[in-house]
Image (tube, grey):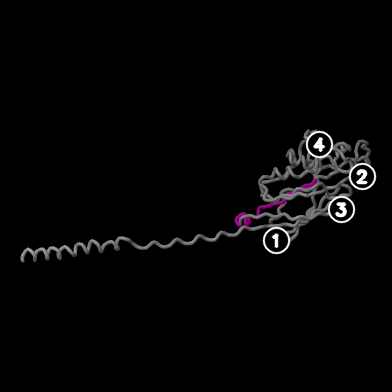
Amino acid sequence: MKLTTLAKIGVLASAPIWLVACGGDDDNNGPTAPSPSPSPTPAPDVTVSYQIEVTNLTQAQPLAPYAALLHGQNYRGWHIGEPASEGLEMLAEAGAPAEFIGEATSAMSSAAGDGPLMPGNSVSFEISTTMSSSDYAMHNWQLTLASMAGNTNDAFAGVTGLDIASLAMGETMVQLVPIYDAGTEANTETAETVPGPAGGGEGFNEMRDDIMDQVTMHPGVVTAADGYADSTLNQAHRFDQYPMLIKITRM
């Protein structure tokens, strides 16, 4: 009987130790971690669009298919006093805009004309680009537009780095566009070297025979009317004033 009683006491005495050991598991989990905050929804991209109307103001200078670019502040299609790029040479001698556009690898958007713009006529097109909201907030996009004067050796009307980001929705900017000499071909005005209807000669020639080899403001043409017998041009082909007008409307 004594042994049995002692055995029972031993079992009962050990029971609380087992219960205490098992009951401590829940106390070691610590406080519950808070759920992470949801990520903020990113601002949507922004699309900017412009309607551009180009008017030929000359009497007898067809303007070749235009090249138009939307780009950032770090791009310029040309610099006065510096040599023209190969793309600009192609545009100014042959009226071909593709290579000029292709050189602008950082451009946001581009457009090209599909035919000549005859004197007194206008053409309209739309150009647009989509950017992040942070880039949009910087307002640093600009316009470059250029087109060859067809009855010349290497003259082009154009504007580069024009600030259009400041235009409000529905606002319009009107700009007279000057004419430049690409400086890549001598201004011989001969029929063999003028690709427009006044000459019907060759356009692009990779040999640069203009001793200037730099972009300058164009001094104008001489013409046969001024006594230059080799010129295929006449007084109607002069461009003493701005040859192009552009009207830009923010859509």
Q: Which residue is mark 4?
A: 185
- Residue 120 has which mark? 3
Between the C-alphas of marks 2 and 3, the distance is: 17 Å
x, y percent for residue 144: 73, 49
Between the C-alphas of marks 1 and 4, the distance is: 41 Å
Whether label 3 touches label 1, CB < 8 Å: no
Q: Which quadrant of the structure image shows residue 27?
A: bottom left
Helix, strand or loop for disc 1: loop
Q: Which residue is mark 2?
A: 235
Question: For the point 26% across and 62% down, which residue is it?
Answer: 24
- Residue 168 has which mark? 1
Circle nearer the N terminus (2, 4)? 4
Which of the image's four quarters has the C terminus? bottom right
Q: Which quadrant of the structure image shows residue 84?
A: top right
Against 16, residue 234 (above or below) is above
User: Where are the magenta residues, as a range?
Assistant: 133-147
- Number of marks present in the image shown: 4
